[in-house]
């Protein structure tokens, strides 16, 4: 099998490309990260792969399929390659199979955009200390954390799990829905700098859930690869700031949640 190509922007702090990379790693699929500077994603030839000029894009030479949008890529990888139902459920558990889609869509429409806006107005926006926007998106981020925390707690009670047993969003195993939240979770130190969030105290189920995912061998290896990229590669994200009139600077790097020194 030829490696599946997943496009990412150096130095790799951006979360969305890592979502399909984690899925490929968890499924044991060969993959190749194609590093493309942010200065090149708004023009050809990249816009032939992703007309929106964002990351990621995926090229699967084994099936002659090119896709963009991380959620679409995740769905493709699961439908095409997860025949053993490692990260999903089958038609014998139909409700759970489709409930995974609800959580994936929540990640795409809720976690990603709201976490991203909180980072933007806290660190990047040209007008500093725009407190109304920072507060709005901070409140929304915590609401999202609460939705997941409460859902995990209900799952724990429903399945009668002990405090030491892992709990997942749907059913009795970790799925692509859970793992889709991991890359944005790693940025919580940047989203809430200076100790503005005590995740373990405020959202204990969420904290344990992320820790359980970050310890999975395949996911752990991907997160370590991301850290290595951040440590060793030039951050071309500055090119985004340069072309956007409402941006001033990128946030300082904060250690990723769930990645050990």
Image: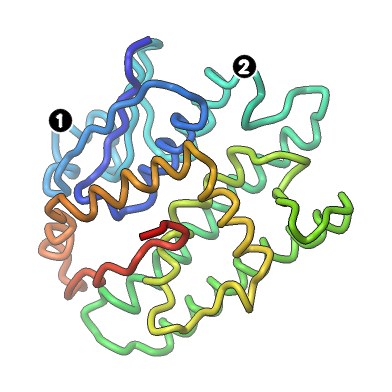
Quarter of the image that includes the C terminus: bottom left
For residue 83, which numbered disc appears in the image? 2
Which percent across, then down, holds residue 79?
A: 57, 22
Image position of 20 with respect to 27: above or below: below
Residue 93: x and y, percent? 81, 29
Residue 119 at x, y = what percent?
A: 36, 71
Image quarter for residue 256? bottom left
The one of 175 and 62 positioned closer to us in this rendering: 175
Kindly identify which numbered label has been placed on residue 217: none
**Residue visible at 72% across and 29% down in the picture:** 89
Q: Total label count? A: 2
Q: Which residue is mark 1?
A: 45
Looking at the image, is 11 positioned above or below residue 145? above
Say whether residue 113 is left or right of residue 167: left
What is the x, y in percent for residue 206? 63, 63
Snapshot colouring? rainbow
Inspect this view and state whether residue 108 appears: no
Q: Residues within 10 Å of mark 1 (few under 14, many from 20)?
A: few
140 horizontally vs 63: left or right: right
Q: Earlier in the sequence, mark 1 or mark 2?
A: 1
Residue in the picture at 44% in, 31% down: 25
User: Which structural element holds mark 2?
Assistant: loop
In-front residue for pair 202/261? 261
Tell me the residue at 27%/33% (across/down): 33
Q: Residue furthest front?
A: 261
Q: Provide the secondary structure element on which disc 1 rests.
A: loop
- Which of the 4 image quadrants contains residue 100? top right
């Amino acid at each position: 099998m030829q490696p599946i190509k997943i496009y990412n922007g150096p130095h790799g702090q951006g979360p969305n490309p890592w979502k399909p990379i984690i899925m490929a790693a968890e499924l044991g699929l060969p993959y190749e990260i194609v590093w493309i500077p942010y200065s090149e994603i708004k023009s050809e030839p990249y816009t032939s792969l992703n007309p929106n000029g964002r990351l990621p894009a995926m090229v699967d030479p084994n099936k002659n399929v090119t896709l963009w949008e991380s959620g679409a890529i995740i769905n493709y990888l699961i439908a095409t390659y997860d025949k053993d139902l490692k990260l999903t459920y089958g038609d014998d558990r139909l409700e759970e199979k489709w409930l995974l889609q609800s959580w994936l869509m929540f990640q795409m429409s809720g976690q990603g955009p709201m976490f991203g806006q909180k980072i933007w107005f806290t660190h990047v926006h040209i007008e500093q200390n725009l407190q109304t926007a920072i507060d709005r998106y901070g409140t929304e981020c915590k609401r999202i954390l609460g939705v997941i925390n409460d859902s995990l707690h209900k799952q724990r009670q429903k399945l009668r799990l002990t405090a030491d047993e892992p709990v997942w969003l749907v059913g009795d195993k970790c799925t692509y829905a859970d793992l889709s939240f991991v890359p944005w979770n790693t940025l919580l130190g940047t989203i809430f700098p200076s100790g503005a969030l005590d995740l373990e105290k405020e959202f204990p189920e969420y904290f344990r859930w992320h820790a359980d995912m970050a310890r999975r061998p395949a996911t752990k290896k991907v997160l370590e690869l991301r850290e290595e990229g951040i440590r060793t590669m030039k951050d071309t994200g500055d090119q985004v700031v340069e072309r956007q009139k409402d941006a001033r600077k990128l946030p300082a790097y904060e250690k990723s949640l769930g990645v050990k020194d």
